[in-house]
Amino acid sequence: MPRFAPHPERRPALVAGASSGIGAATATLLAAAGHPVALGARRVDRCEQIATAIREKGGQAVALPLDVSDSDSVKAYVAAAADAFGDAEIVVSGAGDLSAERVHELDSAAFAAQLQVHLVGAHRLVSQVVPGMVARARGDIVFVSSDVVPSPRPRMGAYVAAKNGIEGMARAMRMELEGSGVRVSVVRPGPTMTGMGTTWDAETTTAVLEDWAAWGLARHPYFLKPEQVAEVIVTVATAPRGVHLTLVEVQPERAVQS
């Protein structure tokens, strides 16, 4: 008898932050692999466009409103997803946006708001689904972190604090859930071409890049594509039972020098 029962072929998935970027690409790849996906974000209209595209290709997907800063919204999202596809087997937590202020110039309420989305929001989500996973003795939680954890960047202090919190929470959860059948993993992307930061004006963008370069944090101009990070997330979440990819960092490869 094997040590671990294999995954079910059909594993309902929740993807928080699925309206664009890494979340949208992850939802699309999970659906292509045969898993029903509940796309959650505040921009539910964008999620519906992605869900429609998934269904047109034969996948199963539903678009649901989700504001991870609101406990009632999280509870409603998880319940609606379960009604649509059954209890979640995979959860990908990646909701959030990025601002560009120095820590000492950032209003405390704005600092707390970023923690509410990136860190507390992630906790709201997992607290709704992990107890059921433990009862079923299987499940995958994948937190989308950032390489700002090992290499902090200036003008991103609240984001840096939140992502450090995510990884600390994930490590504690892995210890608490060891032997439960529930895997908690972190995928840590480097620079990725997503919608984050696209609302900055030219002056802010220039200041950010200059500060990063001054600290050696802009080694080359290449960025990851969301689909490349999504492939790693899906690999982590669908690894065979008995294998636990606890932390995977993904960096863009520099072009070969001629």
Image (cartoon, rainbow, N blue to C red):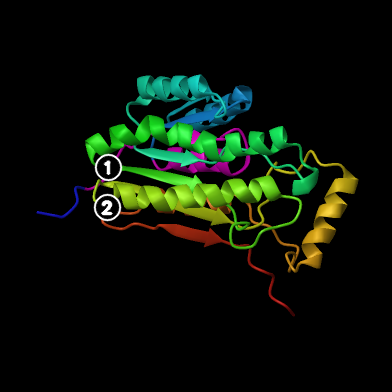
Q: Residue at x 39, y 29 (%)?
A: 128
Q: Is residue 101 visible?
A: no
The quarter of the displayed image where residue 2 is located: bottom left
Q: Which label belongs to residue 241?
A: 2
User: 21 or 179: which is nearer to us?
Assistant: 179
Quarter of the image for the C terminus: give it. Answer: bottom right
State whether residue 59 is above or below residue 76: below
Residue 208 position within the rendered picture, expressed as x and y whole percent measured from the top left: 81, 53
The tag earlier along the polypeptide, 1 or 2, is 1
User: 119 or 232: which is nearer to us?
Assistant: 119
Crowding around mark 1 (Cα neighbors within 10 Å: few <14, some 14 to 19, many 20+) is many
The magenta region covers: 6-33
Q: Is residue 147 visible?
A: yes
Q: Residue at x 54, y 25 (%)?
A: 66
User: 154 or 195: which is nearer to us?
Assistant: 154
Q: Residue at x 76, y 51 (%)?
A: 155
Is residue 95 shown in magenta?
no
Q: Amino acid at mark 1?
A: Arg
Q: Is residue 242 left or right of residue 50?
A: left
Quarter of the image for the N terminus: give it. Answer: bottom left
| Distance from the alpha carbon under mark 1 to that under mark 2 | 9 Å
State whether residue 164 is above or below residue 139: below
Q: Amino acid at mark 2?
A: Arg
Q: Residue at x 25, y 46 (%)?
A: 180
Residue 153 position within the rendered picture, expressed as x and y whole percent measured from the top left: 71, 57
Is residue 24 shown in magenta?
yes
Marks 1 & 2, CB-CB < 8 Å contact: yes
Q: Which residue is mark 1?
A: 138
Secondary structure beneath dot 1 equals loop
Q: Residue furthest left?
A: 1
